[in-house]
Amino acid sequence: MISKAAPSPPIKADVRDLSFSFGQTQVLNSLTLPVAERRITALIGPSGCGKTTFLRCLNRMHDLQPAARYGGDITLYPDKINLLDPAVDPIEIRMRIGMVFQKPNPFPKSIAENVAYGLTIRGIRDRAVLEERTVQALRDAALWEEVKDRLRGPATALSGGQQQRLCIARTLATNPEILLFDEPTSALDPVATAKIEELMTTLKQKVTIVVVTHNMQQAARVSDFTAFMFLGKLIEFDHTDAIFTNPSNKLTEEYVTGRFG
Ligand SMILES: Nc1ncnc2c1ncn2[C@@H]1O[C@H](COP(=O)(O)OP(=O)(O)OP(=O)(O)O)[C@@H](O)[C@H]1O
């Protein structure tokens, strides 16, 4: 069920009747919700309810699996393309909709090469352009001051939190319209977690964010809208305040108050 509270900001992606299955296993069942532009939407729900599967539909990450089947539509605004249309190139979608994973996954290259990676595979060779975009992405990811003197050093020598911000910089370098975060802080300590949360709040001025999190406090702290999922269904979607203080559905209330899951 979706509550009456529709988001007031423009919609960046309109998810309608989204279903998803792997072969005979249906994982998502008719999800409908708006993803508000330049806001943070959190996906919460007990383990196995389909949060990551939903996130990966948004940039067609499941296409690599032959048994994957999508149903419904995800309309990306302002161009109104249906992200699930087989005629839409998933590679192009992944350029426009970036993803940051649970475990930081820098490439075994230098810090600068990591950030410029997406640009170089897109054919950008001009060194001045690469440098400018690398510096900007590192600044936007709140990492520049910590790495500016070691850009040619190995990315793997950074701390876990720095590596995660490097992965965010790598994604930002190609100017994505939407950033998908899949439990981005679950491998990090509280200090590094706080930095990423602060960064997300800053980044939403430029980019739409969807985040999967197991951490209720994190959803409450960073997100503007929250979707609560259970067994592949969307149980409730609303402003985050409403989900945490006055949910409409009993299951949502039990989940956010820690009585199940
Ligand atoms: N490649 C796959 N093939 C078949 N089933 C899959 C595949 N990937 C995920 N599933 C199933 O889809 C369901 C939803 O998984 P998903 O990872 O999306 O849940 P989740 O809510 O993100 O869980 P968690 O919070 O534990 O990460 C699970 O039952 C899972 O076993």
Image (cartoon, grey):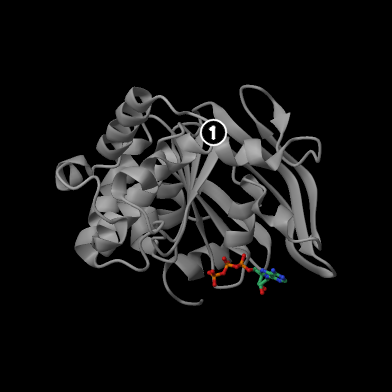
Q: Is residue 5 visible?
A: no
The residue under the point 36% across, 54% down is: 109
Q: Residue 94's image quarter?
A: top right
x and y percentages locating residue 159 in the rendered image: 23, 62
Expressed as whole percent of the image width and height from the top left, the position of residue 180 reads: 50, 48
Determine the image quadrant of residue 246: bottom left
SS at circle 1: loop
Judged from the image, the quadrant occupied by ligand 1 is bottom right
Q: Amino acid at mark 1?
A: Arg
Q: Residue at x 51, y 43 (%)?
A: 98
Viewer-proximal residue among 95 and 255: 95
Q: Is residue 45 left or right of residue 23?
A: left
State the image quarter where residue 231 is shown: bottom right
So how many labels did they put on this image?
A: 1
Check the image and name the residue furthest to the bottom.
Answer: 260
Residue 156 locus on image (x, y percent): 30, 61
Disc 1: which residue: 122
Residue 220 location, x and y as percent?
Answer: 36, 54
Residue drawn at (27%, 59%) of the image:
161
- The yes-or-no answer for disc 1 within 8 Å of ligand 1 is no
Query: Can you name the residue that lies furthest to the right here?
Result: 24
Look at the image and tell me whether residue 240 can be seen.
yes
Residue visible at 47% across and 28% down in the picture = 124
Decide if residue 224 is on the left or right side of residue 178: left
Q: Pointer 1: residues within 10 angstroms few (<14), some, or many (20+)?
A: few
State left or right for residue 257 relative to residue 51. left
Q: Nearer the viewer, residue 171 or 147?
A: 147
Q: Is residue 155 above or below residue 34?
A: below
